[in-house]
Image (cartoon, rainbow, N blue to C red):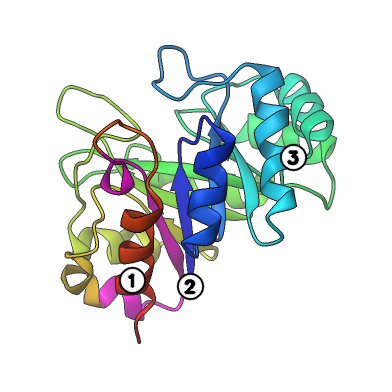
Amino acid sequence: MLVKVCGATTAEEVRAVAGAGADLVGLWHGVPGGHADLSAGRLAALAAEARTTGRLRSVLVTFGSDPSALARTATAVGTDWIQLHGYQPPAVVRALRAELPGRTRVVKVLHVRDGACPEAGLIGAYERAGTDLFLLDAVTTDGRVGSTGHTLDDRTVTALADRTTRSFLLAGGLRHANRDRFGATLAHPGFLGIDVDSAVRGDAGLLDGARTADLVHAWKAS
């Protein structure tokens, strides 16, 4: 089971979540107005910091939709995964996969709002285009996506996961205390791990090692 901690902005945060047992660190780039959006320089520096930990893989998290630009960025900074957050069409995945054959893993977010996923009908197209795995996340009623703190229903997650042939990560309001709400998700053969942000931040708003360790322990417990 993988734990991805999203939204690092400092080297200290990267080291803290690595020491707490996380497996992936999300680095935002091309997220206009995002609280953790990084310049290209900072993205490269933190991806390099992740490599020095010896355990963390870095994930470029973006709303971007220019495949060539994304491929150049991923190659230049050496991120391991690209997470397409937002509503990029399958054609973007196909073009990105062609630019990065067999290297960077491509993650497509599937957004769920009021129990419905607007991209559900495109899942097969995303898979044929070269999506390696999906991330299931909640959208607020007013349309906000990413780091909303809203939680998905266990049955909604598994019903959507049943429509894919790829593995998936779960996001959306996950905390150390609500693992038991996702029994069916945890048992699903496609379940790969979780993605968290706000639940592991300290009072200053930075990613916190102790809170990350508590969450990792709770979710990775057998």
Would residue 77 be found to the left or right of residue 135 on screen? right
| Relative to 109, residue 152 above or below | below
Is residue 100 covered in magenta? Answer: no
**Alpha carbon of mark 3 to alpha carbon of mark 2: how far?**
24 Å
For label 1, count other residues whose C-alpha is less than 10 Å away and answer few (under 14), some (14-19) or many (20+). many
Q: Residue 105, can we see it?
A: no
Does dot 2 land on a helix, a strand or a loop? loop
Residue density around tag 3, few if under 14, some if 14–19, many if 20 or more, within 10 Å: some
N-terminal-most mark, 1 or 3: 3
Which residue is located at x 40 percent, y 39 percent?
119
State the extent of the magenta-drawn residues as a range. Answer: 184-202
Mark 1 and mark 3: Cα distance apart in space: 27 Å
The number of numbered discs placed on residues in the rendered structure image is 3
- Name the residue beneath numbered marker 1: 219
Disc 3 vs disc 2: Cβ atoms closer than 8 Å? Answer: no
Measured Cα–Cα span from mark 1 to mark 2: 8 Å
Q: Residues within 10 Å of mark 2 (few under 14, many from 20)?
A: few
Q: Along the line of sight, which residue is nearer the eye, 213 or 112?
A: 213
Query: What percent of the width, then of the height, locates residue 198?
Result: 29, 41
Can residue 133 be seen at all in this image of the molecule?
A: yes
- Which residue carries the number 2 mark? 1
Name the residue furthest bottom. Answer: 222
Looking at the rendered structure, the kind of residue marked 1 is: Trp
Q: Nearer the viewer, residue 99 or 146?
A: 146
Q: Residue at x 34, y 50 (%)?
A: 171
Q: Are marks 1 and 2 in contact (CB under 8 Å)?
A: yes
- Quarter that holds the C terminus: bottom left
Looking at the rendered structure, the kind of residue marked 2 is Met
Please tell me whether mark 1 sits on a helix, a strand or a loop: helix
Looking at the rendered structure, which numbered label has been put on residue 48?
A: 3
